[in-house]
Image (spheres, helix red, strand yellow):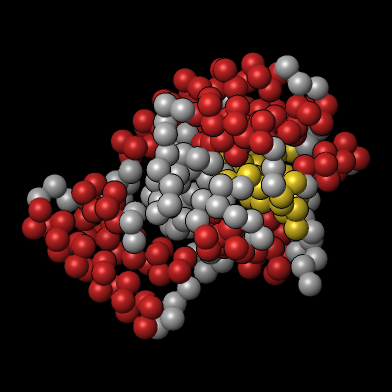
């Protein structure tokens, strides 16, 4: 797992301690493959154990702080761009901004984030558009009715790029609940990571109740599941949510839009995309 090259030095400064953590990690990975564990389940369990062994339960804190600062610096330029559009085109620009934020990802082997190039990333996505594009369906839903959106956040810093989209939801009269992680995992956003941001005035803030990347059903709280069951639509950001939320969606049956940049073969294949594709994918309430 390439991500271990980032995590282990954050957990231990001494080379000997790092080697102990690497050895433990590779043993657990081998055991997981022998037991045929799902990749997400194996990854979450491994990270939990490494955090405990390293006695550090937010090792990505400094990386998250740098990501937030980079997002705050880029956001005004992106906001001005989104404001130039009207109607459906403005929604597409806000979706492009949200996907640009999805590039702030420090846990994908095939991807290295460039925190200094976020505006350029947004501009390229705006120009490229979405390879899988159900944005028109989202636009029609927002216009035709009102309800409650549960928005599953992804990474720290990325959350700031969700702000233009949250504003549009507010303007259409939709109630929004913005859901962060219950406990720090990799660079995923927690309540701490959005404190003081405009998100707090655009949405109610809740958390998954879980200590995991994504929202694996076995680790989220009953409160989170009840929140999803009572909403009208889910916006799901990021690859780990693409991998984990469908289990909950099938059980609860709720219309969901998955908004991501496909960054690894496994996730890309799961949604019929290729690496590098920008995706706004609708999955209806009932999945056959």
- Front-lying residue, 253 or 114: 114
**Quadrant location, the N terminus:** bottom left
Which sits in the foreground, 51 or 231? 51
User: Toward which corner of the image does residue 206 lie, by quadrant?
Assistant: top right
Task: Judge whether residue 158 can be spotted in this image.
Answer: yes
241 is higher (above) or lower (below) than 171 = below
Extreme residue toward the right, this view: 144
- Report the residue at 72% width, 65% height from top: 252
Q: Is residue 231 visible?
A: no
Q: Position of residue 86 (x, y in %)?
A: 80, 22
Q: Is residue 232 left or right of residue 52?
A: right
Position in image of residue 211 (x %, y %): 43, 57
Q: Position of residue 237 (x, y in %)?
A: 60, 47
Tell me what residue is drawn at x 67 percent, y 31 percent: 127
Residue situated in front as seen by the camera: 112 or 201 = 112
109 displayed left or right of 280? left
In the image, taking residue 228 as reference, residue 78 lies left or right, namely left
């Amino acid at each position: 797992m390439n991500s271990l090259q980032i995590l282990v030095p954050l957990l231990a400064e001494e080379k000997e301690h790092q080697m102990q953590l690497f050895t433990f990690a590779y043993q657990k990975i081998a055991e997981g493959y022998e037991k045929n564990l799902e990749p997400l389940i194996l990854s979450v369990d491994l990270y939990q154990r490494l955090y405990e062994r390293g006695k550090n339960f937010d090792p990505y804190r400094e990386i998250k702080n740098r990501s937030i600062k980079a997002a705050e610096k880029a956001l005004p330029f992106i906001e001005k761009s989104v404001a130039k559009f009207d109607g459906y085109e403005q929604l597409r620009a806000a979706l492009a901004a949200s996907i640009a934020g999805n590039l702030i990802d420090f846990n994908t082997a095939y991807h290295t984030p460039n925190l200094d190039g976020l505006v350029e990333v947004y501009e390229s996505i705006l120009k490229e558009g979405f390879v899988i594009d159900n944005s028109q369906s989202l636009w029609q839903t927002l216009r035709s009715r009102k309800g409650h959106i549960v928005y599953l956040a992804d990474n720290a810093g990325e959350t700031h790029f969700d702000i233009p989209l949250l504003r549009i939801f507010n303007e259409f009269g939709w109630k929004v609940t913005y859901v962060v992680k219950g406990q720090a995992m990799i660079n995923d956003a927690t309540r701490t990571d959005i404190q003081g941001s405009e998100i707090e005035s655009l949405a109610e803030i809740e958390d998954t109740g879980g200590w995991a990347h994504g929202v694996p059903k076995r680790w989220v709280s009953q409160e989170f599941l009840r929140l999803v069951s009572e909403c009208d639509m889910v916006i799901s950001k990021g690859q780990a949510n693409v991998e984990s939320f469908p289990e909950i969606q099938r059980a609860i049956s709720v219309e969901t839009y998955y908004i991501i940049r496909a960054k690894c073969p496994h996730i890309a294949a799961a949604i019929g995309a290729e690496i590098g594709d920008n995706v706004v994918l609708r999955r209806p309430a009932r999945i056959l």
